[in-house]
Image (cartoon, rainbow, N blue to C red):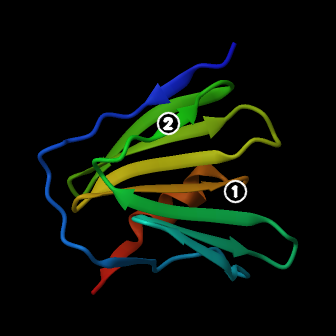
Amino acid sequence: MSIIKKLPYNKYKQFVECEWEIEYLPVGFALHDTFEAGEIKFFEYVDDEGVTIDFSYVPSIAATYIDNTDRIYSVIIENGNTYYLFTSEVADEENVVIWDMNGYRFKVASLYSIDELTKIAFSVKTVY
């Protein structure tokens, strides 16, 4: 049976509309595709071997769900932000980092290590 983890949100937190970018990516990755649907923004980065890193964000009032089956759940607090880490115990399942920052909810997912995904998450900055 699959267990779904719903992350909490702060319905009173206001956000200022802005764009976000990743300042750190592992060597060899380049932007491959983007998708926008209303307030959802999605970016796919791919390396030469076809490995992907998915980055997305929405206003933090949006609910976020993740299937935490076969994943180890942990939390890191860095620079006042709480990062929720879901480390896969299965080789072909993605690792995921989710966090809220400045009124937005972010997600980074990939087969890459949770350490690399955490570095990516820490590098996300605003671009006005």
> As rendered, which of 115 and 35 lies closer to the eye?
35
- Residue depicted at 50% across the width and 36% down the height: 65
Q: Is 82 displayed left or right of 87 in the figure?
A: left
- Residue 24, percent across and down? 51, 77
Judged by depth in the image, the label closer to the viewer, 1 or 2, is 2
Pointer 2: residues within 10 angstroms few (<14), some, or many (20+)? few
Instruction: Determine the image quadrant of residue 30.
Output: bottom right
Q: Is 85 displayed left or right of 71 in the figure?
A: left
Q: CA distance from mark 1 to mark 2?
A: 20 Å
Q: Which residue is mark 1?
A: 112
- Residue 76, percent across and down? 37, 43
- Residue depicted at 55% across the width and 38% down the height: 86
Q: Quadrant of the N terminus?
A: top right
Pointer 1: residues within 10 angstroms few (<14), some, or many (20+)? some
- Residue 36, percent across and down? 52, 71
Of helix, strand and loop, which one carries label 2? strand
Q: Which disc number belongs to residue 65?
A: 2
> As rendered, which of 61 and 72 lies closer to the eye?
61
- Identity of the residue furthest to the top in this view: 1
Q: Vertical placement of 6 versus 113: above or below?
A: above
Q: Vertical placement of 37 versus 88: above or below?
A: below
| Amino acid type, callout 2 | Tyr
Of helix, strand and loop, which one carries label 1? loop
Q: Is 14 displayed left or right of 83 in the figure?
A: left
Q: Which disc number belongs to residue 72?
A: none
